[in-house]
Image (spheres, coloured by chain):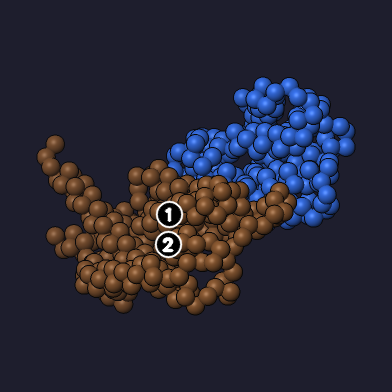
Amino acid sequence: MAWIDYRFDADQLSLRRNETKQAALPAATAAIITDAMTLIDLANPTRFLTLTSRLLPWLAALTAILLLIGLYQSAVAPDDYQQGATVKIMFIHVPNAWLSMFVWGVMSLAALGTLVWRHPLADVAAKAAAPIGAAFTFLALVTGSLWGRPMWGTYWEWDARLTSVLILFLMYLGLIALWRAVEDPSRAARAAAILTLVGAINLPIIKFSVDWWNTLHQPASVMRLGGPTLDRAFLVPLLVMAVAFSLLFVTLHLAAMRNEILRRRVRALQMMQARQRPA
Amino acid sequence: MTSLAALIRRDIKIALRVGGGALIGVLFFLTVVVLMPFAVGPDLALLARLGPAILWLGALLASLLTLDRLFMADHEDGSLDLIVMSRTPLELACAAKALAHWLAAGLPLIIATPVLGLLLNLDAASTSAVALTLLAGTPALTFTGMIGAALAVTLHRGGLLLAVLVLPLSIPVLIFGVAASQAAISGPLSFGAPFSILCALSLVSFVIGPLAAAASLRHGLD
């Protein structure tokens, strides 16, 4: 049973990769590799699970506290002289929009981990981040749309920023579709990693071309809040909300990674049980 | 070099001889363009105004239509494994395959453009402007689409997944292709700026496309 324990402790996420590795190597070399595993222990799924189970309650509590503070500050923030109370949508909208791009960055780093180090935890991180990123992007679009109705008089405007966020949303959905299309998780991870990196290169190009397209079609610029010109009364709640939402992402991401690891273990156990059952 | 030339020759031969690969794209292009007047009405002035956009959309969809066979056919008969294992760098082999695909499926679309321009009431200058932008832009569609085709073949899924993955990536090409055509026909802007960016997009895709497709094939095929 030792090999089963080894698998479960160290690297049971990629069953097939281990099988080939162990079959190809003599016993002594395999032992050395198992010893070397202790060096990168921190990144092993079991250590990750114990670490996150301790960390998650604190993170969740911190997120909740910061969110409460941020929401309170947003509620008591003064109305804008032009926009009135609708400016408060900004405190939800801007953190979501910021995270929609940040999550793609996190997925790109995870994609590098998948392709360069072939690390199964990077696969899990990338897979867990995609739906969360899509949700943040969707919320950014919805809150932007609700903000646009009183300000611009329409729910949807083919404004450069809105359009590029919409394309970002489409790319998130494509990535999720890619994850769902394949049964073998490590194979899906590598395909998704390549698409994530291609997206990371393409997103600035898309953003730039949409800007060009928009100035070509609509010379009238929409009113926007410039970052540095933002008053302190708005800036402080906005920053608190941004930190709170980032923490929310970290919490959700770690929880989703835990779930994914456990889901794969359940699947591996079921497969093993099915194999052991007499025919 | 000879192996790449042989690969290109073989792919073009297969595309031209088997199943009408090149002509089916042109036929699809024609059908899309013919459907447009039924959707927007037989107003010649309106069609002339929408002409470049219709031609570009038709070319985009037509190039997407034949793209999922780029690696799939080779995967089915096993020659893709030989290409992956051969001594020729896989990136170059991917680039050669994409070039062959463009010659067989992309170039006929551009040759068909003048005829379709007549249907859309475009004059000679406008039609040649659209054909020129298509000449500069469709390689980018093929080379970025190749990434999606490589991903789809490693996942044994084609069809709609390919479209979902590739279409968002082709937005910049569409924007600058149509912008350059419009600029040449009526626009206040100069033709040069969007056209140069269109060429730049094609050049960037020549680098990214083969690299990503080769990586995907290498990681994805067991």
Closer to the chain start, of discs 1 and 2, is: 2
Name the residue type under label 1.
Answer: Leu
Position of residue B86 measured from the top left corner of the image (x, y, whole percent) = 57, 50
The residue under the point 21% across, 61% down is A8
Position of residue A111 measured from the top left corner of the image (x, y, whole percent) = 45, 61
The Cα–Cα distance between marks 1 and 2, rounded to whole angstroms, is: 9 Å
Name the residue type under label 2.
Answer: Ile
Residue assigned mark 2 = A92
A18 lies above or below A31: above
- Residue A205 in sight from this viewpoint: no
Disc 1 packing (10 Å; few <14; some 14–19; many ≥20): some
The residue under the point 12% across, 42% down is A277
Would residue B53 be found to the left or right of residue A85 on screen? Answer: right
Q: In the depicted view, which residue is nearer to us: B126 or A155?
A: A155
Specify the subunit that label 2 lies on: A
Disc 2 packing (10 Å; few <14; some 14–19; many ≥20): many
Position of residue B9 measured from the top left corner of the image (x, y, whole percent) = 70, 38
The residue under the point 83% across, 35% down is B127
Would residue A277 be found to the left or right of residue A51 on screen? Answer: left
Residue assigned mark 1 = A139
Specify the subunit that label 1 lies on: A
Q: In the depicted view, which residue is nearer to us: A192 or B39?
A: B39
Q: Colour of chain B?
A: blue
A231 lies above or below B42: below
- When asked about the image quadrant of residue A190, the answer is bottom left
B110 lies above or below A5: above
Q: Secondary structure at mark 1?
A: helix
A36 lies above or below B151: below
Would residue A23 be found to the left or right of residue B106 on screen? Answer: left
Would residue A29 be found to the left or right of residue B102 on screen? Answer: left
